[in-house]
Image: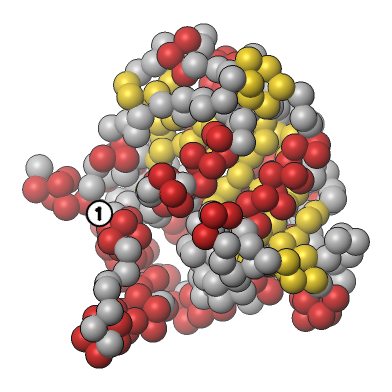
């Protein structure tokens, strides 16, 4: 693929097609900015991105910059406007398509939901369908992460962040690793030392260690307004670029995929958030956790997923689960039939090097290669 657009916030990658025909409507993936986007493209056999390309999607992915102190003032608004909205404009310039199928992962999904509500407030239809991987939009029950988020801890974190302009990625990763201590740390000890088994896949561990910094202003807003005050779930609770937003104004079809063992975005919390949206929602619950539940290719034939075909979303997540049916295998195939069900129109495959935008460099681009350790060394 190629990097077809960049600004100070992100690079936009367009993947090379593997089919003669592609879906007319392009796809935009919004990854979280705490980790690198390649979690969805680790190896050929478990790459969600490659699978989407093989299904005929023209895939664009945002690769976030690894910010330094010069970006201390960057707000959540900048991630909406110079991130997602700028990517939508670039995709339109490249393909001529005004509307995309968008997908956001974890924090990237929270950002996508915020952007959708902002576009709805502006009466702009740029996203035709939205998919949310393990995404919280209601933080009333933040699960185990809530242990780390109270006034005292946030205030001391802010003091550190505002001194240097950012939160070190390693500090955030440390929090997540403590949460998943059982999965991440003890499972290696048990697996390797006690059982003499092979270690976990190295690609996942490398990705987990390859975290990025977060600008102080944006991260403070995220922790306070979303985690502590739960303002995204309140109509008009948050303003983007001076515009009050309301998730209830989002009318486009939405697909939520959450994971039953997720410690970071507990599935019942993601379910509560999904009920705030104003359009048709398909809520799917996958097996496993925050990463393995998403990166679950059909060929592996693992985990399975639960859903209610009637689309009912009762107030209680437990009531929903009791009424749901379990299906074998990967949710990817269910998602593909859902997304193509909204628009099956095809066009000739799009070569990233032959679009209206001049290719800047080859994928994966330079932003993703900026590792914290290499930046320290420099």
Which corner quadrant of the image does residue 313 belong to? bottom right
Q: Residue drawn at (24%, 42%), measured in percent from left and top?
A: 370
Residue 372 visible within the image: yes
Q: Position of residue 250 (x, y in %)?
A: 78, 45
Residue placed most toward the observer, 163 or 111: 111
Residue 121 placement, left or right of 370:
right
Give the residue drawn at x 48%, y 63%: 291
- The residue under label 1 is 164
The one nearer the camera, 106 or 157, is 106
Q: Position of residue 152 (x, y in %)?
A: 42, 78
Q: Quadrant of residue 345?
A: top right
**Foreground: 52 or 12?**
52
The image shows residue 319 at horizontal and vertical percentages of 83, 79
Residue 218 is situated, as x and y percent measured from the top left of the image, at 45, 51
Task: Determine whether the residue tagged by mark 1 lies in a helix, strand or loop.
Answer: helix
Residue 139 located left or right of residue 202: right
- Please state if 323 lies on the left or on the right of 43 as rendered: right
- Residues 187 and 122: in front is 187
Query: Which quadrant, please, contains the N terminus?
Result: top left
């Amino acid at each position: 693929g190629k990097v077809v657009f960049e600004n100070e916030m992100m690079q936009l990658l367009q993947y090379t097609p593997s089919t003669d025909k592609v879906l007319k409507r392009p796809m935009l993936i919004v990854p979280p900015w705490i980790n690198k986007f390649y979690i969805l493209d680790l190896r050929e056999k478990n790459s969600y991105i490659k699978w989407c390309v093989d299904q005929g999607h023209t895939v664009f992915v945002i690769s976030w910059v690894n910010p330094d102190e010069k970006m201390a003032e960057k707000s959540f608004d900048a991630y909406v406007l110079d991130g997602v909205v700028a990517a939508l404009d670039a995709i339109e310039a490249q393909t001529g398509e005004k509307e995309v199928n968008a997908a956001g992962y974890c924090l990237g999904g929270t950002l996508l939901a915020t952007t959708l509500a902002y576009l709805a407030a502006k009466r702009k239809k740029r996203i035709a369908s939205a998919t949310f991987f393990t995404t919280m939009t209601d933080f009333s029950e933040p699960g185990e992460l809530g242990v780390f988020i109270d006034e005292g801890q946030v205030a001391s974190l802010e003091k550190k962040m505002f001194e240097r302009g950012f939160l070190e990625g390693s500090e955030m990763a440390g929090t997540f690793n403590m949460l998943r201590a059982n999965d991440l740390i003890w499972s290696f000890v048990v697996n390797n030392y006690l059982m003499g088994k092979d270690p976990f896949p190295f690609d996942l561990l490398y990705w987990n260690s390859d975290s990025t910094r977060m600008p102080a202003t944006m991260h403070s807003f995220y922790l306070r307004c979303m985690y502590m005050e739960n303002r995204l779930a309140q109509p008009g609770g948050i303003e983007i670029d001076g515009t009050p937003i309301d998730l209830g104004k989002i009318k486009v079809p939405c697909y939520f995929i959450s994971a039953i063992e997720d410690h970071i975005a507990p599935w019942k919390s993601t379910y509560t958030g999904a009920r705030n949206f104003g359009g048709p929602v398909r809520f799917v619950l996958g097996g496993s956790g925050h990463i393995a539940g998403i990166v679950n290719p059909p060929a592996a034939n693992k985990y399975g997923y639960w859903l209610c075909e009637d689309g009912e979303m009762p107030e209680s997540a437990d009531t929903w689960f009791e009424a749901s049916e379990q299906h074998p295998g990967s949710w990817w195939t269910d998602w593909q039939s859902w997304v193509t069900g909204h628009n099956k129109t095809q066009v000739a495959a799009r070569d990233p090097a032959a679009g209206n935008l001049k290719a800047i460099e080859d994928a994966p681009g330079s932003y993703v290669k900026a590792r914290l350790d290499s930046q320290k060394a420099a």
